[in-house]
Amino acid sequence: MEGGNGSQLFGKFQGFWCLGEYIPSIISFQTHFQALDEDIVIATMPKVGTTWLKALVFSIVNRHRYTLSDTPLNLSNPHDLVPYFELFLYANGQVPDLTSTIPSPRLFATHIPYPSLAESIKQSNTKIVYVTRNPLDAIVSFWYHVRAKPESSDWPLEECFEMFCGGEEWFGPFWNHVLGYWKQSLEKPNKVLFLRYEDLKKNPVSEIGKIADFTGFPFSDEEEGGGVVQGIADFCSFSNLKDLPINKTGILGWANTNTMPTNAFFRKGEVGDHLNHLSPSQIQRFTKILQDKLSESGLSL
Ligand code: A3P
């Protein structure tokens, strides 16, 4: 671990940037997690639509267990239903008992880059659903998210922007994170599904169909004709999830010491909000950095 940032220990670990407090959790996860073939892992950089994807995957794979009126999503925030390995399950280096308590398929989430996932995830038939987003929108979203904490309410956007330009954001660099999962999705399309927030916004029904096929829970013709897919899209839409009481006033407990109001995960939910916050020269500068970093891959974000 190297580097530092303000009062919190923050540095590079296994090639990506993270808070020092997550390191025992990451090591415990890498050491102890035993993946099952039926497991589904949602992998993301922060602020790219993780909450939305958790709600979608939960709804798709559990649709025969719950209707949309009695789904646990009405009473629990998606982060409580699809827990993060490093922020919750293995927090502080603990080793949770995941053997008997969770119905199949077990749903998990992580911000950890692909190379640092537990080996059992890579070696098993566990499926990984990855979503990414225009990083400029993620920068703005991340800035708002951090500022939701009273002690960070005056964090300048310029500082946040510089952090992303240097690739020194949580679990970043952004480009490395995306490239890691993107390459796996090309090499092993049955292992990693690569999605984009912008596509989910544009055509949720077709993206939901892709997730259902990939995870092994395809929709039947009857379901498609009967509006089941559209029902999931509507239920998981920004406007519906945001207005559920649990997502308006709930509090999430990540690890022992960290709490976050659930409404911090539902801000604006739109594509292109960076245009309202970043200057043309900032946009141009970040775009150039990104193009350089992705130039050999053929990927564009
Ligand atoms: P904005 O800050 O741009 O509004 P994450 O879940 O990875 O933390 O990402 C949060 C971002 O996803 C926020 O973006 C949030 O508003 C948006 N979001 C949350 N739920 C959503 C939904 N159902 N549909 C679209 N966007 C959603």
Image: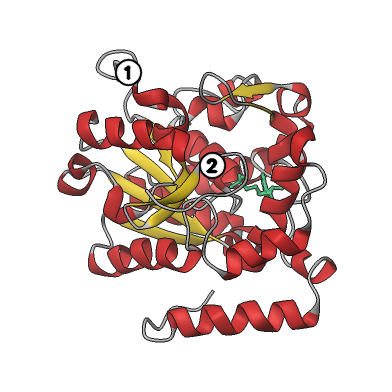
Is the C-beta separation of discs 2 and 1 under 8 Å?
no
- Residue 14 placement (x, y as % from top left): 31, 52
**230 lies above or below 21:** below
What's the amino acid at mark 1? Pro
SS at badge 2: helix
Residue 280 numbered mark, or none: none
Whether residue 143 appears in this view of the structure is: yes
Left or right of 109, for residue 201:
right
Q: Residue extending furthest left? A: 123
Compared to residue 82, the image places residue 154 above or below, namely below
Q: Nearer the viewer, residue 189 or 162?
A: 162
> Is the C-beta of the residue carrying label 2 under 8 Å from the nearest atom of ligand 1?
no
Q: Residue 13 appears at what percent x and percent y?
A: 36, 50
Residue visible at 55% across and 56% down in the picture? 169
Mark seen at residue 56: 2
Residue drawn 69% across the image and 84% down it: 284
Amino acid at the residue labelled 2: Leu
Q: Residues within 10 Å of mark 2 (few under 14, many from 20)?
A: many
Which residue occupies 25% across, 43% down? 126
- Tell us which disc is closer to us: 2 or 1: 1
Query: SS for tag 1?
Result: loop
Instruction: Judge from the rendering whether residue 55 lies leftward or rightward of residue 247; answer left or right.
Output: left
Determine which residue is flagged by label 1.
Answer: 96
The picture places residue 269, in percent across and down from the top left corner, at: 73, 52
Which residue is more in the foreground, 152 or 89? 152
Name the spot of residue 283 as percent of width and height, x first: 71, 78
Looking at the image, can residue 34 be seen?
A: no
Residue at x 25% of width, y 36% of height: 38
Q: CA distance from mark 2 to mark 1?
A: 25 Å
